[in-house]
Amino acid sequence: ATPTAVMVGTGVGASQGILIKGGQALESAHKVNCIVFDKTGTLTIGKPVVVNTKLFNKMPPQEFYELVAATEVNSEHPLAKAIVEYAKKIREDEENTIWPEAQNFASIIGQGVKAVVRNKEITVGNKSLMSDVNITIPVEAEVALAEAEALAQTGILVAIDSKIAGIVAISDPLKPRAREVISILKSMGVKSIMVTGDNWGTANSIAKETEIETVIAEAKPEHKAEKVRDLQASGYVVAMVGDGINDSPALVAADVGMAIGAGTDIAIEAADIVLMKSNLEDVITAIDLSRKTFSRIR
Ligand code: ADP
Ligand code: MG
């Protein structure tokens, strides 16, 4: 393609809310034959809501949620926002916007958060986080997790002073056209893969709904990037589509990194293409545009 054609292509992209950071990004996109999708906030709407709570001690739910929200209010994660929203709703004093003070807050990317609240050690996250900090998961909690996962919900474990105290089940529905986008990509000869930090049960339920055949779950950020490099090593030209801090290593590793516009600044910075409207179908538009710009017409 001529430099003019590339400029035109980039301009057409911009006019449709597809920000292409340079000619190289536009060029690489036409060779893409495999796309790695993040799940949360990419295939799903990313506005999760708490749909269920199971408590394993006698603590009143309000008190439980005070402790959890005080911890999660320090996190940017969409799951954290869902928990804080819910905690606000069930508060006796709904007008109150102040949470108990959290000390020693730590965010473990792709796993969860912890802090000390009211002299209690609060750990909120997935199984891998609990296992890393040597907290055992009782059978009743395993059962509750499995129930949530079968419904495509994410079950978040909450430990108080190193003992599992409850599970918060969170639902984050698929974007309306997710399934259609995957199917169109398939017809374009592009294979789709889902890589998520979420657990296998939820990931498989979501994959079934979108008809994505290949799923990798419980992936830490460096695993997402590793998966991208594995695919490249097997000969694929790989695009990564993601929205989170946890996706940025993979966005950088991919031949084409595409960030969801509504995502975090770090992901947007790491990407070659930004889908400003946060529409999944713009992944197809971007590839189409690149194909039109770079396919040789004789
Ligand atoms: P995804 O790849 O689906 O975007 P992440 O890698 O961001 O997901 O997170 C993976 C998992 O880690 C989540 O499904 C959740 O179980 C846990 N997690 C991450 N951040 C938090 C948080 N702030 N609070 C609770 N759990 C979290
Ligand atoms: Mg995400």
Image (cartoon, rainbow, N blue to C red):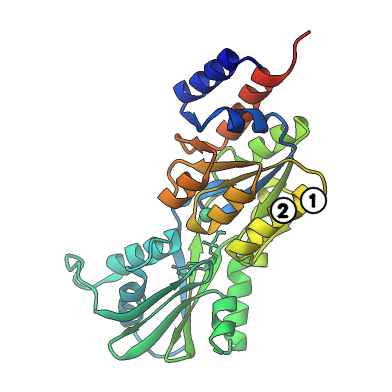
Locate residue 251, reporting x and y percent.
58, 48
- Residue picked out by circle 1: 233
The N terminus - image quarter = top right
Note whether 272 is above or below 286 in the view shown: below
Q: How far is mark 1 from mark 2, CA to CA?
A: 6 Å
Q: With respect to residue 16, does 50 lie above or below? A: below
Would residue 184 appear left or right of 243 to someone viewing this image?
A: right
Q: Residues within 10 Å of mark 1 (few under 14, many from 20)?
A: few
* In the image: residue 7, left or right of residue 296: left
Q: Are marks 1 and 2 in contact (CB under 8 Å)?
A: yes
Classify residue 58 by image quadrant.
bottom left
- Taking the spot 35% from the left edge, 75% from the top edge, the residue there is 71
In the image as oriented, which residue stretches furthest toward the front? 3
Q: Residue furthest right?
A: 234
Q: Can see residue 232?
A: yes
The residue tagged 2 is 229
Q: Residue furthest top?
A: 298
Q: Residue at x 69, y 52 (%)?
A: 228
Q: Three-letter amino acid code at disc 1?
A: Ala
